[in-house]
C-alpha cells in the first residue's frame, strides 16, 4: 500500500461506518378496516393514521397517494400509454393486425364500473375537519393546525373505492383468474425527506413511502382465502391456514386481521380457490405460498424448498431477514414486491416461478428493508435486486460449486446492447421520464446489476461482499441513497469511487480498452473511450508461466487487493504505477517472450468492444 493510500484510509476511518450527519425520517402508523363488496368490486375503508414529524420543521400540509385514480380514462397513466413508442404490452390492446398493429391504452377503454377510484368522504386531523383536494393520484391536505417537529398528528379518514380491472399490478380478475390483487389499494402517506415532498404522479413505475406499522382488518365473504403482508393474527378463525378452523363469521363475512412492523407498503390478495403452503427456513422465517389450486399449482407445490433456501442464503450474505414472515401470493400481472410479501402471476414452470420469487423476495433487501427511492434510484432498486437474485440462483437453485467471477454475463450483454443502441439515457434520470420502456428496463435491471458486478472488479469481490453486509448494518429500516452505498464501499475498500458512480450513472459514456501493441517485450494498452478504469492485464509467456499486471486508476487513490479467482490461478501478480484519465495509452515492459495478452479475463469490465481485448502472438 502506498503512503498516500494509507493516509486517505486513516482519514476515512475517522468518519467510518456512520449515517450521514443530520439524517432523519418520518414515521407512519396505519390502523385500517375495510369492508369488501365483492360482487361490485368495491369496498369501504376507515383509517386511523398516526404521522410523526421528525423533519426539524413545521408542516402546514401533508399529501397522500391515491393510486387507483390512475386507472381512469384521461389519467396521466392513460396518456403515457397512448404516447410512448413502446408501451407495456400488458397495458394495451391491439385493434389492428399482427402485421400492422394499432395499440390503444386499455385504460381508455374502461367503463365507469371498471375504472379504479378512491374517494375521500371524511378526513379529520386530531378530530378537526381539514380542507383537501384531489389532483390526479395526489391528495393535498391543508392542515387544521401545523404539525411541529417532533410531534405526532392523528388523521381519521373514511373513503370508498372501486377496484379497477387488472391492468398494472393491482386490480380484479387477473389473467390467472385471481379475483382481488389489492396493491396500492389504500390512501398512502407521501414521503417527506430532506429533498422535500415526493409527489410523483402514478404513471406506471414504482413507489416511495415512509416506514411504519400496519394493523389491517379485512371483512370479506367467508369463502375467500387471503394472503397478505405481515402476520395473520387469527389463523384459527379463517380458511386456509390451519386444519379444521373455527370460522367466526358475521352475516356471511369473516374478519381477517394482519399486523406488520416497520414496513412501507401493505398488499393482499383474495380468492375463493387459494390454498396455503407453509414452511420455516433454518433462520426461522415463516414462508407462506398462497396460490390457486388449479393447473398452475404444480410448480407452486415444488417451489417451497427453493424459497426457504433463498431466505437462508440471503440472510447469510446480505444481512439477516428481519421480519418473521414472508408471503408469496399468486396475483398481479408479473411480479411486484411489497412489505414482507409479493404478488406473482401463476401459470409458470418451476424455473420461471423460482426466478421470479428470488427477484421479488430479493427486493425485501433492496427496496423494502432499505427504503430506496424507486422514482429515481431505479438502478439501485432493480439493479442490485437483480444481482442478489442472480447470486441466489447460482447458489441455491443451480447449486454451483464454483461461482463464476462474473455471475451474470447476460446482464453485460443487455447493457452493452443498450449502450450501442442510441437509446441509452443516464441512469440518474427520473424513472418515469425515460423515452422508452426498453431504455428504462435495460438501464434499471441490467446496467444497475453491471454497476454492482463491476464494482467488485474495482474494489475486489471480497470487499464487495463486506460492503453489502456493512451497508445492511448501517442502513436497514432507513432511506439510503446510492451515494450512501458508495460511501460504505469507499470506507470498506479505502478506494475513492466518485469518478465511477458519477460517470456510470450520470452519463452515457462507455468503456472501451484495447491491447494496442505488443513488441519488443513492451505491451501498450489504449483507452479508446472517455471512461477511465483500472485495468487487469493477464500475460501468458511462451514458457507457460503467467503474470497478472494490475494498473490502478489514479482517481482511485488506492489499490484493489489480490483476488483468488480461477482466471488468475498460478499467475504472479505485479502492481504497476497508476494510470490517469488524461493519458490515452499506457506502456509496460515484461521480461519474457509473450504468447498472449488479455485485458480482464474475468469479463467484469463492461467493455463495449471486447474483441480487441486479447492479443495472441
Image (spheres, rainbow, N blue to C red):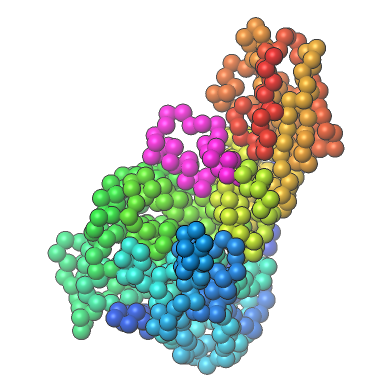
Residue 123 coordinates in the image, percent (x, y): 49, 88
Residue 529 coordinates in the image, percent (x, y): 77, 39
Residue 536 coordinates in the image, percent (x, y): 68, 27
Q: Residue at x 57, y 91 (%)?
A: 131
Q: Residue at x 17, y 67 (%)?
A: 245
Q: Give the vertical position of 250 relative to 93 (above or below).
A: below
- Please provide the residue range marked out in magenta: 386-415
Which image quarter is the C terminus in?
A: top right
Residue 173 coordinates in the image, percent (x, y): 34, 70
Q: Residue furthest left?
A: 244
In reply to whether residue 390 is colored magenta, the answer given is: yes
Answer whether residue 152 is visible to the viewer in this image.
no
Q: Toward the viewer: 560 or 510?
A: 510
Q: Give the vertical position of 365 relative to 518 (above or below).
A: below
Q: Toward the viewer: 373 or 522?
A: 522
Quadrant in the picture for residue 292:
bottom left
Q: Give the vertical position of 239 relative to 493 (above or below).
A: below
Amino acid at each position: 500500500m502506498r503512503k498516500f493510500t494509507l493516509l486517505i484510509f486513516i482519514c476515512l476511518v475517522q468518519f467510518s461506518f456512520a449515517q450521514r450527519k443530520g439524517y432523519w425520517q418520518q414515521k407512519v402508523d396505519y390502523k385500517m378496516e375495510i369492508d369488501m363488496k365483492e360482487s361490485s368490486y368495491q369496498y369501504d375503508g376507515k383509517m386511523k393514521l398516526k404521522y410523526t414529524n421528525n423533519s426539524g420543521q413545521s408542516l402546514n400540509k401533508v399529501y397522500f397517494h391515491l393510486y387507483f385514480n390512475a386507472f381512469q380514462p384521461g389519467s396521466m397513466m392513460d396518456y403515457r400509454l397512448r404516447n410512448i413508442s413502446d408501451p407495456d404490452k400488458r397495458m394495451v390492446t391491439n385493434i389492428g393486425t399482427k402485421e400492422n398493429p394499432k395499440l390503444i391504452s386499455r385504460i381508455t377503454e374502461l367503463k365507469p364500473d371498471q375504472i379504479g377510484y378512491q374517494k375521500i368522504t371524511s378526513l379529520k386531523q386530531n378530530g378537526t375537519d381539514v380542507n383537501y383536494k384531489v389532483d390526479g393520484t395526489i391528495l393535498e391536505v391543508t392542515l387544521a393546525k401545523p404539525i411541529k417537529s417532533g410531534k405526532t398528528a392523528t388523521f381519521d379518514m373514511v373513503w370508498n373505492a372501486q377496484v379497477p380491472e387488472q391492468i398494472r399490478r393491482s386490480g380484479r380478475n387477473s389473467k390467472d383468474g385471481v379475483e382481488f390483487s389489492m396493491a396500492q389499494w389504500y390512501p398512502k402517506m407521501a414521503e417527506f425527506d430532506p429533498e422535500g415532498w415526493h409527489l410523483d404522479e402514478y404513471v406506471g413505475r414504482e413507489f416511495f413511502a415512509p416506514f411504519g406499522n400496519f394493523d389491517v382488518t379485512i371483512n370479506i365473504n367467508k369463502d375467500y382465502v387471503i394472503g397478505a403482508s405481515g402476520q395473520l393474527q387469527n389463523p384459527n378463525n379463517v380458511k386456509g391456514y390451519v386444519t379444521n378452523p373455527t370460522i367466526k363469521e358475521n352475516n356471511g363475512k369473516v374478519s381477517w386481521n394482519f399486523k406488520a412492523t416497520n414496513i412501507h407498503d401493505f398488499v393482499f390478495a383474495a380468492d375463493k380457490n387459494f390454498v396455503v403452503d407453509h414452511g420455516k427456513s433454518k433462520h426461522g422465517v415463516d414462508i407462506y405460498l398462497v396460490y390457486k389450486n388449479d393447473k398452475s399449482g404444480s410448480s407452486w407445490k415444488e417451489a417451497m424448498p427453493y424459497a426457504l433456501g433463498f431466505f437462508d442464503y440471503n440472510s447469510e450474505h446480505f444481512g439477516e431477514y428481519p421480519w418473521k414472515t414472508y408471503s408469496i401470493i399468486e396475483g398481479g400481472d408479473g411480479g411486484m414486491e411489497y412489505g414482507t410479501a409479493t404478488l406473482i402471476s401463476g401459470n409458470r414452470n418451476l424455473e420461471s416461478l423460482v426466478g421470479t420469487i428470488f427477484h421479488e423476495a430479493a427486493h425485501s433487501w433492496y427496496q423494502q428493508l432499505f427504503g430506496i427511492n424507486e422514482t429515481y434510484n431505479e438502478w439501485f432498486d432493480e439493479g442490485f435486486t437483480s444481482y442478489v437474485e442472480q447470486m441466489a440462483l447460482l447458489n441455491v437453485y443451480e447449486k454451483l460449486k464454483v461461482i463464476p467471477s462474473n455471475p451474470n454475463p447476460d446482464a453485460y450483454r443487455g447493457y452493452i446492447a443498450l449502450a450501442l443502441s442510441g437509446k441509452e439515457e443516464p441512469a440518474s434520470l427520473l424513472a418515469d421520464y425515460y423515452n422508452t420502456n426498453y431504455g428504462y428496463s435495460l438501464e434499471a435491471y441490467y446496467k444497475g446489476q453491471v454497476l454492482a458486478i463491476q464494482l467488485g472488479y474495482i474494489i475486489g469481490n471480497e470487499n464487495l461482499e463486506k460492503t453489502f453486509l456493512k451497508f445492511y448494518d448501517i442502513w436497514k429500516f432507513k432511506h439510503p441513497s446510492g451515494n450512501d452505498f458508495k460511501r460504505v464501499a469507499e470506507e470498506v475498500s479505502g478506494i475513492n469511487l466518485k469518478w465511477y458512480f458519477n460517470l456510470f450513472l450520470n452519463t452515457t459514456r462507455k468503456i472501451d480498452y484495447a491491447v494496442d501493441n505488443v513488441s519488443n517485450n513492451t505491451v501498450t494498452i489504449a483507452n479508446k473511450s472517455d471512461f477511465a478504469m483500472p485495468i487487469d492485464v493477464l500475460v501468458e509467456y511462451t514458457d507457460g508461466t503467467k503474470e497478472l499486471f494490475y494498473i490502478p486508476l489514479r482517481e482511485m487513490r488506492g489499490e484493489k487487493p489480490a483476488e483468488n479467482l480461477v482466471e488468475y490461478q498460478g499467475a504472479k501478480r505485479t502492481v504497476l504505477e497508476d494510470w490517469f484519465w488524461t493519458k490515452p495509452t499506457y506502456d509496460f515492459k515484461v521480461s519474457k517472450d509473450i504468447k498472449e495478452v488479455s485485458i480482464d479475463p474475468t469479463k467484469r469490465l463492461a467493455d463495449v468492444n471486447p474483441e480487441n481485448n486479447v492479443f495472441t502472438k
